Image: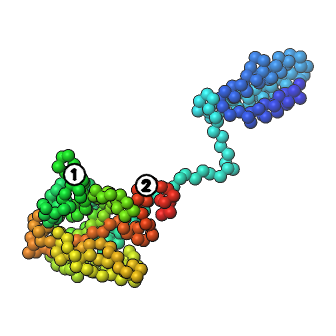
Amino acid sequence: MKDQINLVEKEAREDLSRIDSVDSAEAFRVAYLGKKGKLTELFKKLGAVPPEEKKAVGAELNRVKQWLESAVEEFRQKAPKTGAPLEMFDETLPGVRPTQGSIHLLQQTIQEISGIFSRMGFETVEGPEIETEFHNFTALNIPLDHPSRDAFDTFYTTHGQLLRSQTSTVQIRVMKERKPPLKIIAPGRVYRPDTVDASHSFMFHQIEGLMVDDRVTFSDLKGVLHLFLRELFGSQTKIRFRPHFFPFTEPSVEIDIQWGKGWLEILGAGSVDPNVFKEVKYDTSVVRGFAFGLGVERIAMLRHGINDIRHFYENDLRFLRQF
């Protein structure tokens, strides 16, 4: 009798290893503990066992029965629902590493540029992307007949507002709310209805900077931008300033860096025009300042050898994972 019990237990252990759902666990229970189950049949034969062996055989049968019942119950608890595969845990298998994301290259560039200016004492500020003509044009000394105000060059909304075409709008908002001294940079998205190609996009990123105080000079502007560009492109970077025109600065300059065998325009800057200060109620006899602006995509493309601005926005992981 004991040999038969051992044989049934051995078969049960083999069948137990193949259970993978609640349904198969129930089939296993019926096969061994049902009315015609293998262990049930052995219990029926207990009456024919000699009296001196009956106690030991009965104890052995009960042991196997309890083990089978607990094994079935354990599998039922592991399975989330009927017919669902059981989630077995094998601690010897290697772990599944979760997919790790990364910061987009444009955001990396913004953070690096912001970090350089932060070390020079500039505060990073943000503002709305839907703006008024006052903040985007009028307060920046851009006249009514300027081409940038035309619908071909600016996205206007049906409610008389517009999508900002420059983050200089943030400078105006900050100056309206605060008094000098100010040292700020304003990174963010801007919008212009350009035809999309390898070097143009209707949406891109800018970083505009502003410093206002009672002793700010053009020399301060040159010093800040020399330090910034050499920190960004390397300490041996050669820099030149060229006269230019912007409505909101006077005098105005474009700044170039030596790139290969030639010069490459990298940003625009100048002393804040007194008309801008008048719009924000600053006393032009007391305060002076300078402003500058650059395109983030242009910086990223130069530093990483990217020849098509569209790569930044296509969400192609083959491109994005390189950075």
Tell me which residue sits at (55%, 51%) in the image: 98
Is 197 left or right of 31, judged from the image as shown? left
| Front-most of residues 314 and 273 | 314
Do we see residue 211 in this rendering?
Answer: no
Tell me which residue sits at (45%, 54%) in the image: 315
In the rendered image, residue 236, in percent from the top left (x then y), is placed at 40, 83
Residue 132 location, quadrant: bottom left
Give the SS element for disc 1.
loop
Is 18 left or right of 60, judged from the image as shown? left
Do we see residue 291 in this rendering?
Answer: yes
Q: Amino acid at mark 1?
A: Tyr
Q: Amino acid at mark 2?
A: Glu
Q: How crowded is the residue under tag 2: few (<14 C-alpha within 10 Å), some, or many (20+)?
A: few
In the rendered image, residue 147, in percent from the top left (x then y), is placed at 19, 62
The residue tagged 2 is 314
Is 283 left or right of 266, judged from the image as shown? left
Q: Is residue 311 above or below residue 26?
A: below
In the rendered image, residue 12, in percent from the top left (x then y), is placed at 78, 31
In the rendered image, residue 27, in percent from the top left (x then y), is placed at 71, 25
In the picture, the disc for residue 156 is 1
**Position of the N terminus by quadrant:** top right
Among numbered discs 2 and 1, the one appearing first in the sequence: 1
Tell me which residue sits at (43%, 59%) in the image: 311
Tell me which residue sits at (32%, 75%) in the image: 265
